[in-house]
Every structure is written in structure tokens, then in C-alpha cells.
Image (spheres, grey):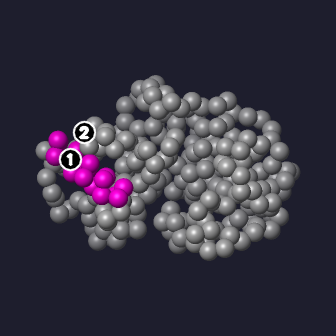
Amino acid sequence: MNHAGHQQAHAQALRAGLARHGVKRDPHFVAVWGWRTGAAYRAAGREVLVLERGYLGDRFAWTSIGWNGLNGRATFPEHPDDGGARFRSMGLALSPMRAGGDYVLIAGQVPGDAALGGRNLQGWYEAQAARDWGLPVKFRPHPLAHKRGPVRPVGGAAMDRSPLPEALRGAARVITFNSNTGVDALVAGVPATCDDAGSMIHGVTDRETWAHALAWKQWRLDEIRSGVALEAVVGRLRG
């Protein structure tokens, strides 16, 4: 982990949490924030514990913890079947799935984001907008996309820069490559699809079961520091 403030805070919490489980340093294992560094360690044959932003609720308040990949490509520890207690404890609830809507919403992503694996999505956006949805199409660029250069328009799609809750309100469907907007959409009751196995909505068949499991893939900083978040992780570390 580098010197960014949140990464240092997580490094300190992780060390404290592992110490509570009596786990010492092991040259075969490494913990990183994000997948850019993690991919290099993994290619070198290391077991990589990847920390990143969470998926549900305030993503800056939660941290995902998985092995050897990012988001849907990570292996997450087993979790208890708690009937959704952890999900509800986050103050979350699944809105009823809606039928109908005024437009199809294409979710833009930050160019160069590690989740894209080097892929440029402009052609994908264009292809999605050209499909016959039977409804108008809107393209919502990621709010931070402009930091990587000018945001290009998508042919056949109106630009929508509204806040995500507002953009979802009138959407009949959300189309994503692997954006976390798919998670927000399903929780809000908006049908959503993805085109990449790295998406956290890939393969969802039962929305309730999926949401309850997803709540166990993210943790607060205090849960990492106390070791609670690492109970399922340490078994692998001890081998």
C-alpha cells in the first residue's frame, strides 16, 4: 500500500487486525490497495489480498476484501447465511423491482480504471446506444471521467450528467460494462445488466440472496482493525 492517507489508514488497521489473530509476515502473501500493484504481485506467484472501495451504501465508508483479483474476479471468503441481517444493519433495503421507465441508461466509467483492464469503452458505449431498445437512450458519464480527458458524446444517446439517484429514477434499464452503478441500480429496483465477469452483478439470479451476500464482502475500518473482518481470511493465511 502506498502513502495515500486512506491506504495508510487501512495498512495500519490491517496490521492490527492480523496481529489480533496472531498472523505474522509470510513472504508468500501480500496485501495491497487496488489491483494495479496486485496484478504484478499475482503474476509473480504471490497470494494477494486486495482491498478496495466497497459496493453498497457509502462506498468510502466500506472496504472490500478479496483474494487475487478485483471485484467480481476476486475470491471472497465464505460468509454466514444470516438472512440479510448484516445488509439491513447497514440501513439498506431493496426497493421493489420496477416495470416500465422512460429511457435506457448507459453507465459510463472512468477511463483507465483498473477494473477495465486497459479497455477503452467508447466503442462499447456506441454499440449499446445503437441497439434497438424501444426507448430513448441516455449516457451518463462517470462524474470523475473528465479528470482523464474530455468526455466524448455517444452517438444516439443523450448526455445525462444528473446525480445517480435522479438518473435512476426514470430509467427502465441500466446497461453497464462492469460499473458499480449496476449494484446501485439493482438495489434501487432498476433492472441492470453487465457485459463483464468483473462486475459485481455478474450472474445475479436471486437479487435478495445476492444483496445479502454482498454485504459480507465489505467492511468498516474498525472491523478490519479489530480483526472481525479478517476471521475468514486468516484460515488461508495459516494454510
Amino acid bearing label 2 = Ser
Residue 232 seen: no
Q: Nearer the viewer, residue 104 or 222?
A: 222
Query: What crowding class fits label 1: few (fewer than 14 Cα within 10 Å), some (14-19), or many (20 or more)?
Result: some
Q: Which of 10 and 208 is in front in this view?
A: 10
- Residue 17 counted in the magenta span: yes
* Residue 226 tag number: 2
Residue 70 seen: yes
**Left/right of residue 4 with respect to residue 160 in the rendered view:** left
Residue 222 occupies quadrant:
top left
Q: Which of 136 and 202 is in front in this view?
A: 136
* Label 1: element kind: helix
Counting residues from the N terminus, which is met first, the one under dot 1 or under dot 2? 1
Query: What crowding class fits label 2: few (fewer than 14 Cα within 10 Å), some (14-19), or many (20 or more)?
Result: some
Q: Name the residue under label 1.
A: 16
- Please determine whether, in this image, residue 39 is positioned above or below residue 176: below
Amino acid bearing label 1 = Ala
* Label 2: element kind: helix
Residue located farthest toward the bottom when viewing the structure as drawn: 149
